Amino acid sequence: MENRSEKISFANKRDLLIISAVFAVSLGAVFMSKSGNAEGTSAVITVGNEVVKTVDFAVVDRDSKDRTFEVGGISGAVFNVSERRIRVLHSDCPDKICVKTGFISKPGEVIICLPKKIAVRIDGNNEIDAVIG
């Protein structure tokens, strides 16, 4: 029998190049999605598929700096708008994920409350069309 000593390597140069390229693209996608300067112009509150309220941030800024309100048709949920941001301030749902999400302000960001079927979405000018990664 012949004793061969074969070199076992974790990855060859080509594998490392592919891994590096995938990592760089992923990192770039994350950076692009986090660094957008887009500012939301309004918040759209829906229950199920029905829009129940649209909050225009420009009007809130002009009228007051901070606004807390409830929306008719949604019992047990209190919303707060401050400095072109919105959050669910209080909800009587069991897990309170919607409250823990905190403020959202950039176009495309969403707060979801599954037990109440509430979605709060920021609309506005978003410079990024898509992030692939």
Image (spheres, rainbow, N blue to C red):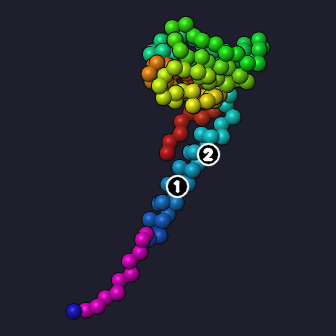
- Rendered residue at 59%/39% (across/down): 33
Q: Nearer the viewer, residue 17 or 104?
A: 104
Q: Residue at x 67, y 20 (%)?
A: 81
Residue receiving disc 1: 23
The amino acid marked with disc number 2 is Phe
Q: Position of residue 98 (x, y in %)?
A: 54, 27
Horizontal side of 61 relative to 100 (left or right) equals right
- Residue at far left of view: 1
Three-letter amino acid code of the residue under disc 1:
Phe
Q: Is residue 125 visible?
A: no
Tell me which corner region of the image, top left, top right, bottom left or bottom right, holds residue 100.
top right
Quadrant housing the N terminus: bottom left
Q: Secondary structure at mark 1?
A: helix
Q: Which mark is residue 69?
A: none
Q: CA distance from mark 2 to mark 1?
A: 12 Å
Q: At numbered mark 2, what does the secondary structure look like: helix, strand or loop?
A: helix
- Residue 54 location, x and y as percent? 60, 13
Position of residue 52 in the picture relative to residue 37 (left or right): left
Of 78 and 54, the residue lying toward us = 78
Please give the label number shown on residue 31. Answer: 2
Is 6 part of what is drawn in magenta? Answer: yes
Q: Residues within 10 Å of mark 2 (few under 14, many from 20)?
A: few
Q: State whether residue 108 is above or below residue 6.
A: above
Q: Magenta segment range?
A: 2-11
Residue 10 is situated, as x and y percent measured from the top left of the image, at: 42, 71
